[in-house]
Image (spheres, grey):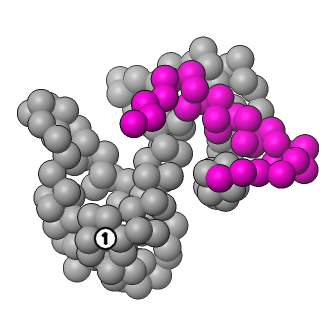
Amino acid sequence: MFNPSRDQVRRFFCDAWQKDRQGLPLVGAETIAVDLIRLHPEYHALLADVERALSQEWTPEEGQMNPFLHLSLHLAVEEQISIDHPRGIREAFHALARRLDDPHAAKHQLLECLGEAVWRAQQAGNQLDPEAYLEAVKRAGRG
């Protein structure tokens, strides 16, 4: 299983953004990453500055989301929806997107649910509970 380092993840997003800005062809997950980056103009300057991207830290005390964590969670959610894993996530996402009338906002809700599920698993020293995650998304979809 591929387990990239912090710097590898940051370089992946920066490199994809740079390739797109230069009009170079994107491959694989770079295409999805760039689509996500376009939805987040607040990250464009950071992604264009590789040295800053590699050195900057974001802590919970600062109250600011780590852009690379945010984009990585976005990639995870995109993959989950595309393959419907956990089973039912695609339907739950579409219900939430209809309720919010905004697919991007719905994906942000999934990010929050996924982030919470990951945090709970880490705190308990367990694997992520896909059923609890899916149920949280379904609750969000019901309002």
Quadrant for the C terminus, please. Answer: bottom left
- The residue sitting at 16% across, 67% down in the picture is 135
* Left or right for 86, reference 63: left
Magenta stretch bounds: 1-28
Q: Position of residue 136 (x, y in %)?
A: 19, 63
Vertical relation: 93 (above or below) 119: below
Quarter of the view holding residue 97: bottom left
Near-viewer residue (118 or 105): 118
* Left or right for 56, reference 105: right
Residue placed under numbered mark 1 in the picture? 89
Residue at the front extreme, as displayed:
1
Near-viewer residue (129 or 71): 129
Residue 113 lies in magenta, yes or no? no
Residue 4 lies in magenta, yes or no? yes
Q: Disc 1 marks which amino acid?
A: Ile
Q: Position of residue 44 (x, y in %)?
A: 72, 41
Vertical relation: 41 (above or below) 127: below
| Camera sees residue 37 | no
Residue at the left extreme, as displayed:
124
Quadrant for the N terminus, please. Answer: top left
Q: Secondary structure at mark 1?
A: helix
Q: Position of residue 4 (x, y in %)?
A: 48, 29
Vertical relation: 22 (above or below) 142: above
- The residue sitting at 25% across, 42% down in the picture is 118
How many discs appear? 1
Quarter of the view holding residue 17: top right
Q: Residues within 10 Å of mark 1 (few under 14, many from 20)?
A: many
| Camera sees residue 124 | yes
- The residue sitting at 82% across, 42% down in the picture is 19
Near-viewer residue (55 or 81): 81
